[in-house]
Image (tube, grey):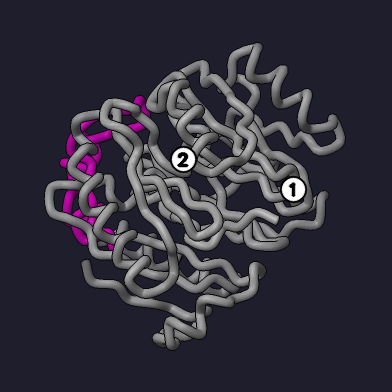
Amino acid sequence: MTLTEDAGPIDARPDDAAEIGRSATQPRIMLVDPAHFDVSYVINPWMQPGAWAADPAGHAAAARASFDALRRALAESGATLDVVEGVAGQPDMVFPANAAVILDRRAIVARFACAERRGEERPYLDALEGFVARGLLDEVTTFPEGCFQEGAGDAIWDASRQVFWAGYGQRSIRAATDTLERFFGKPVSRLELATDRFYHLDTCFCPLSGGEVLFYPPAFTEAALAVIHAHVPPEQRLEASAEDAAAFCVNAVNIGRTVVMARAPDHVRGLLAGRGYRVREVDLDPFILSGGGAYCMTLRLDRSST
């Protein structure tokens, strides 16, 4: 796969060796070019292939503009970006949060529950092996056959608590959380998802740099909410509204004190501003037609534990 790289807001390709020791405050993020993106099937309740089919050229142009706006917002927030080419016939590759779980320069590549996305597994593996060749990762493996786990969308590293929050019950299976725990040797807090409207953890749960957690309570079972409450004190729980969640604003990318997200309702904007975060909004409507937001469209390559 072809890779392009943005170093902050300036398009340039720095020497890879110099990038290996980059500061944790300057994240490295993988995106997938949207050239092959469309909405042509339904595997979650948000997907609208009929709306896409009404104006495919217009939606494709809007998707390109949205992608470019997200790319710019992430770069201007301090991220270095690696843009990977997609594959024809795999429209959801534009959501690489589901590609793999990565921590401490080690990656484990997803196994997709839905047949429509299984063709993404090999291209993602190739892309990540390319990062190994460039010295940006040390190891890449895959989940066992039949052990469905959909990447960082269902395994979110919480740097404040040094734990993986792992979603299961919709796309990822509970047994995959055991594989995750063994592979990384890190604790895993398991959260059962209650509804197919919030089919990945990243659609309803977002740990923030200050220790707060933005989440949408109705997306979780009572047992999962008990786990959240046990680990996150009340003053750090930021509860999103139904409007916030439907706008895909919990599906956000946090870089320092900046939170990049889809266009935000007043409620979530106020919640975050009240904690000192700067909200950077991007019109991601073309991708919301497929059930994805800002976090879905990114894969952090340089997550590290203390």
Could you classify mark 2 by the number of other residues whose Cα lies within 10 Å: few (under 14), some (14-19), or many (20 or more)?
many
Q: Is residue 284 visible?
A: no
Could you classify mark 1 by the number of other residues whose Cα lies within 10 Å: few (under 14), some (14-19), or many (20 or more)?
some
Relative to 39, 88 lies left or right = left
Q: Earlier in the sequence, mark 1 or mark 2?
A: 2
Disc on res. 160: 1
Position in image of residue 100 (x %, y %): 40, 47
Q: Is residue 148 visible?
A: yes
The quadrant holding residue 48 is top left
* Highlighted range, magenta: 33-60
Q: Circle 2 sits on which residue? A: 153
Position in image of residue 160 (x %, y %): 74, 48
Q: Residue at x 44, y 55 (%)?
A: 298
The Cα atoms of the two marked residues, 1 and 2, are separated by 18 Å
Which one is nearer the viewer's eye here, 91 or 118? 118
Instruction: Tell which residue pokes out farthest to the top in this image.
Output: 222
Q: Are marks 1 and 2 in contact (CB under 8 Å)?
A: no
Helix, strand or loop at mark 1: loop
